[in-house]
Image: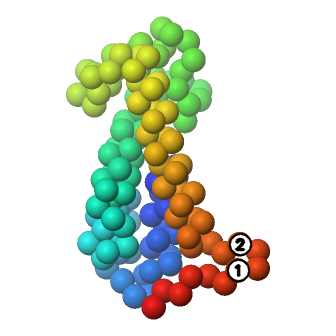
Amino acid sequence: MDVEFVVQLLQLAHVAQHPEILVPGTLQAISRLEQAGLLDKSIADTLKCSYQFLRSIESGIRLMNLSARHELPTEPAELERLAFLLKAENRSSLDGDELVGACQQARAECRGIFEATFQRWLPAENDEPPDNH
């Protein structure tokens, strides 16, 4: 999941200067990265919200015992079943089609943050890594 990769990259890049960011939970790590000034509040909020939403979908898919654990169901009946399951657990109020749109939006937002973060912290072939000081 893009959120976890972003969090882990930032933890690895900054743990020497900010040991308090090295915590096991993704949501707690996002909060610590924000508190340390390594993530803007808006980005941290997007990552937290998207992470919780996408994890709830993954959990619902697992409960449905589907073989594809990281993909939304493609059959309309299964998609509606997933939406119903998430509503029953108070994790979402969306129907099947809205769930697809919200999932695509959350993934796209996380992918944008992922790409920006990796572009910033992983040097191109002949570039030097950014100066952390």
Q: Nearer the viewer, residue 58 or 66?
A: 58
10 Å crowding of disc 2: few (<14), some (14-19), many (20+): few
* Percent coordinates x, y for residue 94 in the rendering: 32, 21
Q: Are marks 2 and 1 in contact (CB under 8 Å)?
A: yes
Res 23 visible: no
Q: Which mark is residue 110?
A: none
Q: Which residue is drawn at the image coordinates 45% and 63% (left, top)?
A: 7
* Percent coordinates x, y for residue 20 in the rendering: 31, 79
Q: Which residue is drawn at the image coordinates 58% and 65% (left, top)?
A: 118
- Where's the C terminus, which quadrant? bottom left
- Identify residue type, mark 1: Asp
The correct choice, above or below, for 24 with respect to 46 in the image is below
Side (left or right) of 62 relative to 94? right
The correct choice, above or below, for 80 with respect to 114 in the image is above
Write down the residue under mark 2.
124
- Identify residue type, mark 2: Ala
Q: Nearer the viewer, residue 39 or 63?
A: 39
Q: Which residue is drawn at the image coordinates 71% and 72% (left, top)?
A: 124
Res 133 visible: yes
Mark 2 secondary-structure assignment: loop
In 3D space, how far apart are the residues under numbered discs 2 and 1 (Cα atoms)? 5 Å
Q: Residue furthest bottom?
A: 133
* Percent coordinates x, y for residue 131 in the rendering: 53, 87
Side (left or right) of 97 relative to 25? right
Write down the residue under mark 1.
127
- Quarter-wise, where is residue 25 in the image? bottom left
Q: Which residue is drawn at the image coordinates 41% and 24% (left, top)?
A: 99
Q: Residue furthest top?
A: 77
